Amino acid sequence: MVRSKNLTVRKIRAAVLRKKDGPLKIETLGMEGPQDTEVLIRTVASGVCHTDISMIHHWETADGPQVLGHEGAGIVELTGKKVKAVRPGDHVVLSYQSCGTCRECKKGRPTKCRRFYELNFGFHRLDGSNALERSGVHGHFFGQSSFSSHILATERNIVKVSKKLPLKILAPLGCGIQTGAGTVMNTLHVQRGASIAIFGTGAVGLAAVMAARIVGANPIIGVDIAPLRLKLALELGATHVIDSRCADAASSINSIIAGGVDYVLEITGNPQLLRLAIEVIKKRGTAAFFTGDGVPDFVPKGKKAVAIIEGDSVPQVFIPKLIKLYQLGKFPFDRLEKFYHFRDINKAIRDSKSGKAIKPVLIMSNNNSRYSIPDLYVANWNDERRESFSGSTIPDRQFYS
Ligand SMILES: [Zn+2]
Ligand SMILES: [Zn+2]
């Protein structure tokens, strides 16, 4: 692992994953940075995304302790010498990381970055170093690790937002919400009058429902097994909903639109629904898959399947667009959110899994723009201090809800 030299080390509080299936434990860690191209952000809030939960369940001992979280929002505390896009005090929403120098990034397609996997799932910076290394913990998940009081990001994965909007509302835009809306608007370019079915009406699916309504798709069919989520889908723009536990989804869709739909978004990962997605699209229709494993190998000729990464969104372009739609009342994604104090992170995860919460959002600190961390938390690292540092806690007032 590459070491960064002469960087300040700060005490932070972060939720650490140390065993398969969790729970996460909030610990005090030392975070080294910012580097010249980095931005230090005080986290105000972070969404909990399905990918975080999946990481918790797939964790193995060899992975080592990790800080997850990749839907952060917060206030810039400090910027490295080379940072131009933001200044201390600015409000930012965080998104996925990309390198900025590969051919795809240069063409303006950061979701296809050649280093996408490494930078978002590799738990290190572009240069291979890890800001939490001194604490023996892996950070930089999606260039963030936002289950933390502080985040180190770069200009590539931050989006400056208005100070008038509460950051806790905006936090989930950077992954789940932009993925659902982006699939409809950026990847599939769904047109007015096109038919669309959305399998799985959680946060990603409901963002897709709202986007489908905005572009004028019709019908918009929501398929799920949770009556509460289906009810919300109807309220947010679905023209029809199907409870796939009670009804045969294929024949129900056929009775709504004979011959199949133009588009299906398959967000559940359920093997039966994967097949069904292909079945119910009409000839030359497209099925979009969100599993991260590419597309199924049983797609017949004449039908199309695409694998979705972040809805082909360029965060600095698409997130401001979604915020504008939100302000116009056309994209009320705040209706999916449920807020939790940071210390209740494991409850938030449980509620997400059980369906009690569609989009849990953790609150780490307040939205106050005045950026000040008491000196207590800013210390140049040295080994004498290491002892008093471990086990110390940051007073709760920094983490109020
Ligand atoms: Zn790249
Ligand atoms: Zn995500």
Image (cartoon, rainbow, N blue to C red):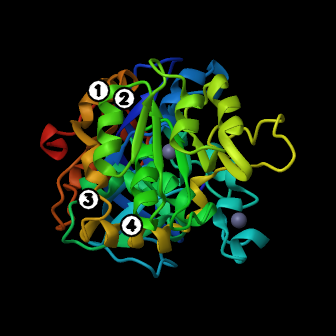
Mark 4 vs mark 1: which is more N-terminal?
4
- Identify the residue position indicated by label 4 in the image: 322
At label 1, the amino acid type is Lys
At label 3, the amino acid type is Leu
Side of 99 relative to 388 (left or right): right
State the quadrant of the N terminus. top right
Whether residues under marks 4 and 2 lie with C-beta atoms below 8 angstroms apart, the answer is no
Residue 193 appears anywhere in the view: yes
Whether residues under marks 1 and 3 lie with C-beta atoms below 8 angstroms apart, the answer is no
Residue 12 appears anywhere in the view: no
Residue at position x 53%, y 37% from top? Answer: 255
The percent coordinates of residue 88 (x first, y second) are 31, 73
**Disc 1 packing (10 Å; few <14; some 14–19; many ≥20):** some
Residue at position x 70%, y 30% from top? Answer: 275
User: Which labelled disc corresponds to residue 167?
Assistant: 3
- Identify the residue position indicated by label 2 in the image: 352
The mark closer to the camera, 1 or 3, is 1
The percent coordinates of residue 183 (x first, y second) are 56, 56
State the quadrant of the C terminus. top left
State the separation of the CA atoms marked 1 and 3.
22 Å
Q: Nearer the viewer, residue 311 or 139?
A: 311
